[in-house]
Amino acid sequence: MLRFLTAGESHGKALVAILEGMPAGLPIDAAWVDRELHRRMQGYGRGARMKIEQDRIEWLAGVRAGETLGSPIAMLIPNRDWTHWEDVMAAEGTPGEARRRRVARPRPGHADLVGVLKYDRQDARDILERASARETTARVACGAVAKRLLDALGIDVGSHLVSLGGIMAKVPAPLPRPLNPASDPSPVRTLDPEAEAAMVARIDQAKQDGDTLGGEIEVVVDGLPVGLGSHVHWDRKLDGRLASMLMSIPAVKGVEVGLGFAAARRPGSAVHDPITSDPGNLRGAGFTREGNNAGGLEGGMTTGEPLVVRVAMKPISTLMSPLRTVHLDTGAEANAQSERSDVTAVPAMGVIAEALVALVIAEAVLEKFGGDSLGEILRNMEGYLGSLTARRAIAAESEPEPEEGA
Ligand code: EPS
């Protein structure tokens, strides 16, 4: 329903993003998308590449006079680094010709080795250029448009970093709302200043050691109406759709919803969130939960509580103190290729995860309130929330019916 495609190699000429399925009449400008691209480029521990790039989109299609048309939205993001890589990456030439910067010593943990075997390539650059997380720029551009739609419906998507290099941040309760104005100013996007200092020091140490670091982020979505997603079929459950999308981010190895893995180690009485009446909670249909261990999802549907998803990223596989590998041509022992790279990109991963969560939620919104224009979606959503409020008002006036076993 809401689909997106990306194309582009890390050191190619440009990245291209196409987003299909957005309604007409959504006000948007390039600055809105560019702001998200800029956020993705931040974070302590990134390499020199982020000083070269100044990611900005050029609209190619789908937007006219500051509004979406309902047609596919196409965006171009030029790579500034292309000027240094033109001869390496040029489309013109002879198949198999020797080029500068061939990669023949595959990095453990990267797509290098399996990629050259599977795609019958002699140069791992043919693989790594696309496996690179540079591609996530295009996803963030699509996610920014999805975020704009959610923003128009009063839904906010934010994130913060909860661990880096094994250092855990203390998470304040309640979380600041909106979240991003509080997390973005931190160089690692954490809400715990003490942990922040320790994380920055850990990154400096890892850089000195030629090592890399992973970590975890948390995405929180506020303002969701109850009932997005569905319990009726596996591929309509929001938990599964979110996990699938988030696990597709390069280097991501785990996704948790709400309490996540910890829920498996507790009895039910210490996991499930008791339901209470809360007539003021309109998007929750007049109900709320004591706590949010469910992370805002029950039965694959939004409960009206904030959606809370955690994402774990392994350390980047390009190490400046390289691991052992073998040479592709001879099979002889070698040190893996070390190229310019990042010590960590966990803070940026939070921004990428926000974009992908926004795309999943926007699709669920379109399924529930489907319309061809923003106005139609707004009317449909208002009608739905109005009917839930009316249902609650009627229920409040009627005597409870005797229930078996109640
Ligand atoms: C990456 C290596 C580095 C990162 C890059 C991902 O790039 P380069 O090899 O040009 O120094 O900076 O990330 C991005 C370019 C980006 O936009 O996020 C890799 O090998 O995956």
Image: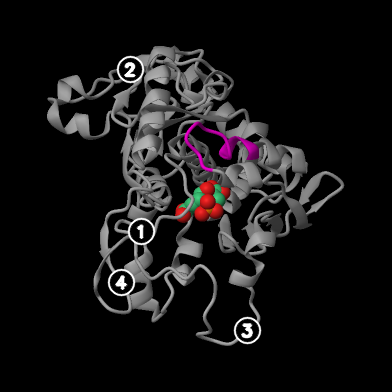
Q: Hey, what amino acid is under mark 2?
A: Gly
What is the residue that sits farthest to the right in this orientation?
65
Chief SS of the magenta region = loop
- Residue 158 at what x, y percent from top left? 52, 29
Assign a secondary structure to mark 4: loop
Instruction: Find the magenta span and give its range.
Output: 38-47
Q: Is mark 1 within 8 Å of ligand 1?
A: yes
Q: Which residue is mark 3?
A: 93
Quadrant placement of the N terminus: bottom right
Mark sitting earlier along the chain (1/4): 1
Q: CA–CA distance between discs 1 and 4? A: 15 Å
Give how far apart the Cα atoms at labels 3 and 4 are: 25 Å
**Closer-to-camera residue (213/242):** 213
- Closer to the camera in the image, 271 or 325: 325
Amino acid under disc 3: Gly
Q: Secondary structure at mark 2?
A: loop
Label 3 or label 2, whichever comes before in sequence order = 3
Q: If you read the primary sequence from the N terminus, does the residue marked by circle 3 or circle 4 appear first?
A: 3
Q: Residues within 10 Å of mark 1 (few under 14, many from 20)?
A: some
Task: Report the front residue among 274 and 129.
Answer: 129
Instruction: Name the residue tied to disc 1.
Output: 110
Q: Which mark is residue 291?
A: 2
Question: Of 176 and 322, which appears nearest the observer?
Answer: 322
| C-alpha distance separating marks 2 and 4 | 54 Å
